[in-house]
């Protein structure tokens, strides 16, 4: 079976091996696809109880662990951290581990819900930071994930305040310095006009126009509104995901 191309496999330890080939494929080939036991069950086409049973030996020896948040049960693929103890099987990082590496269990849950909400709205989500940050300079506030816009992956900034986005040392300034062609700012329902005004004010406050474009995505539909410095007036323009094109 072909294995995840992103994970650096350790030849000194056995690869995780599950009795169900569908679940095994998810864990090894598509580790970023699932986070919760419900997602593994739905993706593999088996019952959640069977998923727990199949993971059982690896849960018992500490290779894997379960984390409970609200009504969801999430699978952590490196509960002892990385590198994992030599006694544990080699397991690629799943989506939940990627989120938990960056934040608390509560914040990870909130970001996971946002990812799934944006996917339901039609966005293609990328959770590999290597791909999201490709070609960018150093960032203090790195994103949790990005969205695909054509051939590009645009970092997503979830629900920041106006000051966090457009302040003198805010997120737009940081990502512009890092060379990001664009960022996607997710705002609360009803905050679209305020966020667009703040972005426009930030762009026009510069003697030389910044190069970064901003997509403002208003919850819960996440329809893109584009503010591009190349447009002289920096007016927000509603666009569709299908026709959206960003300058490189």
Image (cartoon, grey):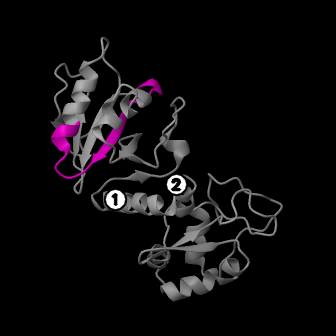
Q: Is residue 120 left or right of residue 3?
A: left
Q: Which mark is residue 29?
A: none
Residue, x 46% and y 44% (percent of image)? 143
Q: Is residue 1 left or right of residue 209?
A: right
Report x, y in % for residue 217. Answer: 26, 46
Count of picture labels? 2
Quarter where residue 216 is shown: top left
Q: Residue at x 24, y 19 (%)?
A: 204
Disc 2 vs disc 1: which is toward the camera? 2
Q: Residues within 10 Å of mark 1 (few under 14, many from 20)?
A: some
Q: Residue at x 48, y 86 (%)?
A: 47
Above/below status of 247 relative to 189:
above
Q: CA distance from mark 2 to mark 1?
A: 21 Å
- Choose between 52 and 197: the one closer to the eye: 197
Q: Note whether 24 is above or below 243 in the view shown.
A: below
> Up-down: is 213 above or below 191?
above
Residue 72 percent across, percent down from the top left: 44, 75
What is the span of residues highlighted in magenta in the rendered image?
Answer: 176-195
Comparing 2 with 120, the one in front is 120
Residue count near mark 2 (Cα–Cα under 10 Å), binned few <14, some 14–19, many ≥20 = few
Q: Position of residue 64 (x, y in %)?
A: 65, 72
Quarter where residue 21 is shown: bottom right
The quarter of the image holding the C terminus is: top left
Q: Is residue 2 left or right of residue 166?
A: right
Local secondary structure at mark 2: loop
* 179 inside magenta stretch: yes
Residue 91 shown in magenta: no
Name the residue carrying label 1.
119
Q: Mark 2 highlights which residue?
A: 103
């Amino acid at each position: 079976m072909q294995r995840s191309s992103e994970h650096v496999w350790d030849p000194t330890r056995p690869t995780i091996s599950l009795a169900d080939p569908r679940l095994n494929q998810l864990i090894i080939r598509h580790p970023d696809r699932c986070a919760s036991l419900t997602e593994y069950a739905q993706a593999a086409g088996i019952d959640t109880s069977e998923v727990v049973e199949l993971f059982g030996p690896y849960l018992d020896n500490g290779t894997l662990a379960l984390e409970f948040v609200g009504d969801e049960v999430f699978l952590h693929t490196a509960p002892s951290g990385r590198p994992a103890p030599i006694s544990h099987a080699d397991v690629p990082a799943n989506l939940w581990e990627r989120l938990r590496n960056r934040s608390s269990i509560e914040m990870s849950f909130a970001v996971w819900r946002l990812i799934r909400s944006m996917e339901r709205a039609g966005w293609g989500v990328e959770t590999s930071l290597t791909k999201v940050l490709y070609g960018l300079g150093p960032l203090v506030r790195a994103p949790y994930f990005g969205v695909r816009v054509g051939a590009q992956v645009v970092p997503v900034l979830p629900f920041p305040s106006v000051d966090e986005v457009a302040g003198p040392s805010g997120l737009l300034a940081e990502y512009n310095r890092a060379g990001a062609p664009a960022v996607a700012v997710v705002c609360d329902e009803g905050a679209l006009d305020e966020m667009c005004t703040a972005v426009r004010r930030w762009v026009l406050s510069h003697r030389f126009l910044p190069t970064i474009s901003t997509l403002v995505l208003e919850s819960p539909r996440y329809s893109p509104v584009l503010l591009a410095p190349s447009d002289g007036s920096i007016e927000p323009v509603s666009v569709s995901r299908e026709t959206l094109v960003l300058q490189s």
